[in-house]
Amino acid sequence: MKLWRTPFDHNHSAEPLAYVFIDRERCKGCGFCAEYCPCDVLKMGSELSSKGYQLAVVKDGDKCLACGFCELICPEFAVKLTINNKVHSEIKS
Amino acid sequence: MPDHEGNGHSIIAKYLRQDRLPHIWCPACGIGPALNCFLRAIDKSGLDPDKISVISGIGCSGRVAGYVKLDSFHTTHGRAIPFATGLKLANPELKAVVFSGDGDLAAIGGNHLIHAARRNVDMTVICINNFNYGMTGGQVGPTAPYDVRTSTTPYGNFESPFNLPLLLYASGATYIARWTVLHLHQLENTMTEALLKPGFSFVEVISPCPAVYGRMNKEPEGLDSLKSYEKRSIIKNGADPKDVGITQNGPIIVGKFIDVDRPTLHTNLAVVAERAKKQVKNS
Amino acid sequence: MTDNGHLSGEFFINGDVACAEGAISAGCRFFAGYPITPATEIAERMSRRLPVVGGTYIQMEDEIASMNAILGASWAGVKSMTSTSGPGFSLMMENIGLGVMLETPCVVVDIQRAGPSTGLPTLVGQQDVMQARWGSHGSYEIIALSPDSPQHMFDLTVKAFNLSEKYRVPVLIMSDEVVGHMSEKVVIPEISAADLIYRKMPQIGSGPYHPYKADESLVPPMAIAGQGYRFHVTGLTHDESGYPAMTAAAQDRLITRLVDKIKTHADDIILYDEYMTDDAEIVVCAYGITSRIARYAVKLARQQGIKAGFLQLITLWPFAERRVRELASRVKTFIVPEINRGQIVYEVERCSCGKARSLSVPHSGGDVHKPETILAAIKECHA
Ligand SMILES: Cc1ncc(C[n+]2csc(CCOP(=O)(O)OP(=O)(O)O)c2C)c(N)n1
Ligand code: SF4
Ligand SMILES: [Mg+2]
């Protein structure tokens, strides 16, 4: 992410709100997550899985807003979102 | 370090039989996302998972029973609802959820569907509507819109479909909602509400079946169907069920249509049981 | 009436009502059915009695629903029953198979009338006995009992529940219109817990629960919904874990056990009655209402000096194969009167292995045999 000025809390929030993990064994390349991620975090890569499916990949993890839509829409239960609780609690306080 | 507590996938792990993955559904099938919402709804509902039974009929959608880490029954084609009715009546402490397909619930099981709604038996029915018989290779089903192509309507469907919310409304269901598998947050909330609603609740999930229905109807990829839903969906909570019929290319009205209260079968049965005991005592 | 709502004492009631009372005494607390002559009185009696004893009666939208509802109720841990007649029995077939596959205790009563199709709704038949054995698709074994009187209806209904709980299988009561509608004295005993069998449950803390893992009895313990086991059961071919297993090997393992769990316990299950068979040269073999007439015909034959005997099949399925074989080795002829055009006679013939002759005395239904008809058949064989 390119910033026009450095925010005061930059050192903390540079960590993304959540980490997206794609299970390469489960992904079957449907493209749902890449198409419907509201923040363009994910895209379809060029690499094929061991079963021959085109894998989804994390393109820009920093942009993740932890909405969880990718996790929900994945037909294969292949996307796992790990919320960064540290950052979340800092945002709250 | 990231903290795993409270994350979506730990909820999934709690209610999904992960040892059964990968599941049998085709790539880009909509049943997976619907199941995902359902698992979260269970968690959100706060119901005791040990007291929830999932009952399915036969079909791709009917295989859901095999993937939920709950007491689960994979019954025969069309018969999940009467099975669930018996289960629930015999032990009212249980929460009965029927998860199945449009063909299973509205064709071969159509009579059970309307009668369960009429009785207002305490049960949630989740219907994956993919407009065809997925499991048997894409034949025409009771919700297939007029003129669509299926493996048994090669020249176009010459029948008219059921409008499921209208059918259920006429039958007496007290909670009726419809979402597509693009409306997942709404679907999750709706499922949670339906699970907690006393009486008969019905959730229709419009879902892509790219492998057979999509292939024959210019939506060969699951994404094609989702994009079509995106274009065609109109959210109208409280819409009159008679206005929500689905055509081949027309709008798909989604939302919560009906949420009313009416005495359930169980409350009525309890009244009668009391009366019976009194009458016998006095005689 | 006792505190728990059970009747006991002497009553003058018909077979249908006796069946309903047998169910209540056996601990049945769920009934789902659909009205049909001549079985309706069972449903009516249950609708009156169940609410009083803390049970649930429901009239479903058809017999398919009724059958499934009793399976569901059984998985909720409640003894359950449905009753019907020919057309409804046909509708139940697919899901009787589900009951066999899920190994679900339950009782199905068929008050047989004359068919096919709507046939003679108010008149007797015994035409569904082969359907009872083979009516659902696939290979399986099932238990079917055949009562001959209202008292028998009571007794065999209690027995049916016990067998179904013990062997985890639907048990069929193959009665008929005459037995269902005849009124006679019925003695209802005080039933104590010791008279009743309940399904084996899994032992808590005995490791992970596998719904279809059986011990040497071949009958697996049965968990019920809501106990926290979170089990899965399916009508698909499955392994011990309950999950689908789509191979010929899994199919063979499962079906062999389902068949063997009945076959290896045949001696415990099979009931029959005999009259003057010790020195008999001709044995009349009958069941249900026909056995009463057959017994009388044998008595008449004896009076005329003919060495006739009588074998009453109380358990129709599994078939009393061993006993028929034994008799076949020393009698000349079996005579099988039944109110159909010949069904059980083929079983008798099969088990006689050519050692004794089998003669059918068929009847198309609507009425029972006349004793003279059976007597004439005996005399014909004697000549
Ligand atoms: C009595 C009976 N008839 C037919 C079938 C074959 N069959 C299996 S699934 C199915 C259709 C399922 O369609 P639907 O309920 O819409 O589920 P989907 O596969 O589309 O999710 C049929 C006809 C069957 N199993 N049992
Ligand atoms: S056939 Fe259709 S409904 Fe069935 S799994 Fe494949 S995509 Fe899903
Ligand atoms: Mg379908």
Image (cartoon, grey):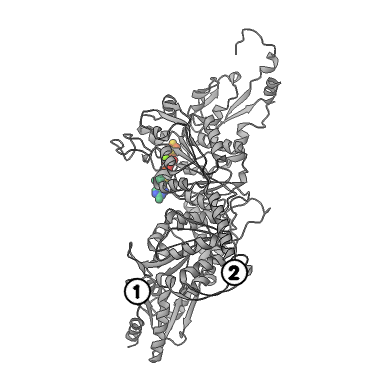
Residue at image mark 2: C1
**Could you tell me the amino acid type at mark 1?**
Asp
Depth order, front residue of C127/A25: C127
* Location of residue B260 in the rendering, given as x and y in whole percent from the top left corner: 51, 38
Q: Left or right: where does residue B99 sit relative to residue B228?
A: right
Q: Amino acid at mark 2?
A: Met
Q: Is residue C236 visible?
A: no
Residue B208 is left or right of residue B94, and the answer is left
Using the image as rendered, state which of residue A41 and residue C272 is in the foreground.
C272
Q: Position of residue B193 (x, y in %)?
A: 55, 36
Residue depicted at 50% across the width and 62% down the height: C46
In this rendered view, identify the residue nearer to me: B84 or B115: B115
- Given residues B63 and C24, the one toward you in this image is C24
Report crowding for label 1: few under 14, some 14 to 19, many 20 or more residues within 10 A (C-alpha).
some
Quick one: SS at disc 2?
loop
Give the letter of the chain under mark 1. Answer: C
How many marks the image carries: the answer is: 2
The residue shown at (52%, 30%) is: B186
Rounded to the nearest angstrom, the CA distance separating label 1 from label 2 is 36 Å
Q: Which mark is residue A85?
A: none
Q: Which residue is mark 1?
A: C367
Check the image and report above or below for A69 versus C13: above
**Residue A7 visible in this rendered orientation of the protein:** yes
Query: Mark 2 packing: few (<14 Cα in 10 Å), some, or many (20+)?
Result: few
Residue B139 quadrant: top left
